[in-house]
Structure formats: structure tokens, C-alpha cells
């Protein structure tokens, strides 16, 4: 039995936007539409990388797609191809998510390499990126005022540091060349847009490379609003350890205010034997992994996170599935949620409560997080182990002691996200498990997994003060959230002043 303590009166921090994703809600050239699920889970960020893979389908996001002829005039709007990228971002905005725009190129797994080599003119590349930002945020070239705040320079330049001359996938050059490139781009963009967050480099995870990066950037006085990095693992503890290491590195080199963005993460047991991991990441086991990882990130130095991947046709997509392949019929959605989607919904129930409160469990396989806004409170918990099965008589049984409940009394509802009996590997259902009212400020409940359930369960607890409306009764975003999102369109003109070079 796992003994859990939650104190809803003890705030320990803010809930963080960790349930972001890579890719937008309309994918495969706008055929599949996940917008209702983006809204349901309140997904806060959509990172633009590997969009419409491979090569951005020649039209989406990547620098070579938006600016097809590198020898063209970067100051001429006619040199740019914004059409489909604009539509892609508009779909994200309709889903009420913010964008993390990766400036660079998609990964290239194919043996013929095309766009991942160092640009032939670093300064011109930086000016091209500048005009992309102006188009999105300032209306340049018949553009928009989206106020996209996060702009990421490149992706995984450390991925092939030993084989970049033979088989580069993201950066076909030396680390030293990348440092020169990053310095040029970051200094130029930050001088143009001091109010935006300019960062990178979307590290694949090489710690020694990261140390050299931080040291070189500090020596050269390069601004770094955020440091982004990636991890694929079956062990949430490795996410926590990596986050602590990168936070420590940033602090060591004086980047104490630099945000930590984990903007690619997913389940992977063994890169040399990938199929079993792709089979598991879409199941209830994958759902428990996502829940455990989100909880782990909340209690770690990670500030923002984005799961890879939300594009329903990609192998990495554990959130959605397609029921009936199609092309060009996105007005008739054929997208449905997979079990891990419910972990993101559960985390969002805490995120909208804003304040993380004290929670702890002494069992290594037990993960718990709780939040409160004073009137409404909630918690999510699960048992997760790198082993596929969890013993129902061990860490899947919870004895939960809740303190700091509303003095005026409250209602408590416990929900269980369970594998569907008819399709336990691909479907999950949420059911009320326990409902009670109490006038006490302390309450203890014990939760048991359903009989014959050999897969992990994600539990959600909803606490509502007497006479108040449950936070779960809102439709997608609260009115406050929608107002804050719409207010993002208001931009300080002083942040946008920069002469074209």
C-alpha cells in the first residue's frame, strides 16, 4: 500500500505548462483534425518541428520552405512563402495553444542530406529569421500579430558530433561552427526583439556538448532566454536527473534566469530495439508513463515541456489514433484519443488551478501531484514502473490523507481512468469511482484498483468547496484563460523597434 499525504492549504509553487506537444491539431495537409482534443486537454504549447515531415513537405515552417532561395533578397516579401505555414499556425491559435517556433530545419533520416548543413551566410540566415518573426508578430509581408513569444534556434546540433561528416541528421558541421552560428543568430534576434524569448539549441542530450555550449556562450556574452533539450526514456527519474543537471550547468555559467524547456520527450526503452516501445507508448502503460513524467517534471526544474508527438500519423503519437485513413477531408474528423491523452487531461485539471500544493508519497513507484485555487482543489496520481505490470497488492493501492480541506465543507469526487474492457490496449475510459461530502478539514480515503486490472490506473481527485462550482464544469478554457490568451495580441511597440539591415 502506498501512503500519500496532500495538504491543500500549503502552496509550494505554481503549476507549470508542461502538457504541451509538438505539432498542431490539423495534420497531414489538414486532413486530420485534433482541435477538440487540444481544447479538452488545454494543451498550452505547440512546438513547430518536423512539421509535415519530411522536409516540411516543401511548404511548412522550415527555413528552406519559408525562404526557398537562399540567394534571394531577404528584405523582399516576394522572397518568402508563408502560405501554408500561416494556415498551420492559425489552426494552433484556434485550439488556444501558444507556439514555440523552431527556426531551422527538420531532422533528416534519409541517406541523402539536403538542408541540415550550416548556412552559407550566418548573418543573412539571422535576417531571414528576423523577417519570419516580423511576419508572425508585426504584420510584415501581409502578416499577423500573433505575439509568438518563444523562438528556438535549430534542433539537436549535438546528435551526430562523431559522425557529422558521414551521416548528419540535424547539423552537418562541427560544434565550433554551430557556436559561431548560434552567437550570430541569437545576438541579432535579441537586438531586434528584446521582449521575445530567444533560445535553443534543442539539445539531443549530450552533457559534455552542453557544457561547451554554455561556457562558449558565456565567454562571448550571448543572450539565452531559454535552454531547450530532449530526452527519450522509460524512466521518469532520468527526466528529473537531466533537468537538474542542465539547470545546474546554466547556473554555473551565470544563466540563472534562463528558462528550462524540455520540448521533446516520449517513451523509449532501447534505441537498438524500438518496436516494443512504440507498441507500449500508445497503451495504458504509456499513459501511466506520461502521468508519472508530467508529475516528475512539475517537481523538477523544467519550466515548459512539449511531448513528441501530436501528429496522428507519426509513430511517436501516443495521444491520438486515426479511425479510417483519408486525405483532404479534415472537415470530417477521424481522430480519437488514445490512453496517454487522459494523462494530459488529468494534468490540465491541476494546471487550471494555478497553485501546486504539498503532496508526497514514500513509494518509488507512486507518483502524485496536487493543486488548489482556494475554492477548488485536485490531485492526480498513478503507479508506474519500468516493468509492464504493476502488482495490484503493492503500489497500486493508495491510502490518501488529505488536509487543508475547506472549513465550510466540501464535496470530493474520485475518478479512475481505466483501460476499456473491450479494447484495453487502445482505449481508456474515465469513471467516477467515489463521491462523498465532508465538513472536516481532514479526510482519508483508500483507493483499490478494479479486480483483474493488471494495467496502471490514473486517478483524479476533485475537491469543491461547499456551494461552489466544480472546476471540472468549465468548457475547455475558463473565461480568464481566454481573456489572457486574447490579450496576447496586445504588443508593446517599443519591443518591436529594429531597423532592417
Image (tube, rainbow, N blue to C red):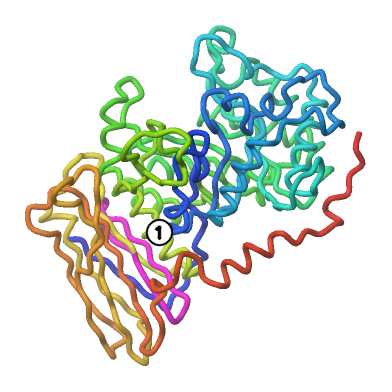
Which region of the structure is painted magenta?
A: 360-379
Q: What residue is at 21 percent from the left and 39 percent from the top?
A: 387
Residue 313 in percent (x, y) is at 40, 33
Q: Main secondary structure of the magenta part?
A: strand
Q: Could you say which is closer to the camera, residue 112 or residue 223?
A: 112
Vertical placement of residue 241 versus 44, above or below: above
Residue that badge 1 annotates:
347
Whether residue 76 appears in this view of the structure is yes
**Residue toward you, 220 or 190:** 190
Q: Is residue 175 shown left or right of residue 436?
A: right
Residue 365, x across and y down, in percent: 25, 51
Residue 373 lies within the magenta run: yes
Tell me: residue 449, above or below residue 228. Answer: below
- Say which residue appears at 58% left-offset and 72% top-offset: 480
Under tag 1, what secondary structure?
A: helix
In percent of width and height, residue 289 lies at 32, 46
User: Eyeballing the image, is 214 above or below 478?
Assistant: above
Q: Quadrant of the C terminus?
A: top right
Direction top: furthest residue: 166
Amino acid at each position: 500500500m502506498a501512503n500519500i499525504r496532500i495538504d491543500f492549504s500549503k502552496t509550494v509553487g505554481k503549476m507549470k505548462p508542461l502538457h504541451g506537444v509538438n505539432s498542431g491539431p490539423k495534420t497531414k495537409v489538414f486532413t486530420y483534425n485534433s482541435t477538440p482534443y487540444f481544447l479538452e486537454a488545454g494543451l498550452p504549447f505547440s512546438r513547430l518541428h518536423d512539421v509535415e515531415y519530411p522536409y516540411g513537405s516543401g511548404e511548412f515552417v522550415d527555413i528552406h520552405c519559408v525562404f526557398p532561395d537562399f540567394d534571394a533578397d531577404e528584405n523582399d516579401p516576394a522572397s518568402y512563402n508563408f502560405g501554408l505555414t500561416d494556415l498551420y499556425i492559425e489552426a494552433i491559435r484556434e485550439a488556444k495553444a501558444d507556439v514555440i517556433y523552431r527556426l531551422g530545419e527538420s531532422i533528416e533520416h534519409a541517406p541523402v542530406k539536403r538542408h541540415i548543413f550550416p548556412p552559407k551566410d550566418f548573418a543573412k540566415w539571422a535576417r531571414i529569421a528576423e523577417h519570419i518573426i516580423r511576419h508572425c508578430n508585426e504584420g510584415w509581408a501581409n502578416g499577423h500579430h500573433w505575439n509568438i513569444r518563444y523562438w528556438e534556434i535549430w534542433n539537436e546540433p549535438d546528435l551526430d558530433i562523431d559522425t557529422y561528416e558521414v551521416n548528419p541528421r540535424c547539423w552537418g558541421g562541427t560544434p565550433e561552427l554551430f557556436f559561431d552560428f548560434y552567437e550570430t543568430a541569437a545576438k541579432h534576434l535579441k537586438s531586434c526583439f528584446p521582449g521575445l524569448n530567444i533560445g535553443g539549441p534543442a539539445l539531443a542530450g549530450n552533457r559534455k556538448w552542453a557544457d561547451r555550449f554554455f561556457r562558449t556562450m558565456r565567454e562571448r556574452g550571448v543572450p539565452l532566454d531559454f535552454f531547450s533539450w530532449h530526452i527519450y526514456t522509460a524512466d521518469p527519474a532520468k527526466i528529473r536527473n537531466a533537468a537538474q543537471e542542465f539547470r545546474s550547468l546554466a547556473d554555473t555559467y551565470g544563466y540563472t534566469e534562463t528558462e528550462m524547456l524540455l520540448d521533446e520527450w516520449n517513451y523509449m526503452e532501447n534505441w537498438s530495439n524500438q518496436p516494443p516501445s512504440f507498441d507500449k507508448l500508445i497503451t495504458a502503460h504509456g499513459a501511466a508513463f506520461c502521468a508519472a513524467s508530467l508529475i516528475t517534471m512539475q517537481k523538477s526544474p523544467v519550466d515548459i515541456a512539449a511531448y513528441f508527438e501530436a501528429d496522428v500519423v507519426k509513430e511517436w503519437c501516443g495521444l491520438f489514433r486515426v479511425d479510417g485513413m483519408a486525405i483532404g477531408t479534415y472537415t470530417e474528423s477521424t481522430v480519437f484519443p488514445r490512453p496517454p491523452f487522459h494523462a494530459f487531461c488529468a494534468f490540465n485539471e491541476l494546471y487550471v488551478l494555478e497553485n501546486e500544493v504539498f503532496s508526497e508519497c514514500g513509494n518509488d513507484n507512486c507518483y502524485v501531484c496536487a493543486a488548489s485555487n482556494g475554492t477548488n482543489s485536485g490531485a492526480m496520481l498513478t503507479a508506474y514502473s519500468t516493468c509492464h505490470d504493476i502488482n495490484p497488492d503493492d503500489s497500486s493501492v493508495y491510502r490518501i490523507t488529505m488536509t487543508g480541506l475547506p472549513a465550510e465543507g466540501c464535496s470530493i469526487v474520485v475518478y479512475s481512468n481505466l483501460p476499456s474492457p473491450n479494447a484495453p490496449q487502445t482505449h481508456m475510459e474515465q469513471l467516477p469511482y467515489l463521491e462523498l461530502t465532508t465538513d472536516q478539514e481532514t479526510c482519508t480515503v483508500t483507493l483499490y484498483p478494479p479486480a483483474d486490472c493488471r494495467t496502471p490506473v490514473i486517478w483524479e481527485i476533485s475537491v469543491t468547496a461547499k456551494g461552489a462550482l466544480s472546476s471540472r464544469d468549465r468548457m475547455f478554457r475558463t473565461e480568464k484563460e481566454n481573456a489572457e490568451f486574447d490579450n496576447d495580441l496586445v504588443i508593446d511597440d517599443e519591443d518591436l523597434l529594429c531597423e532592417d539591415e
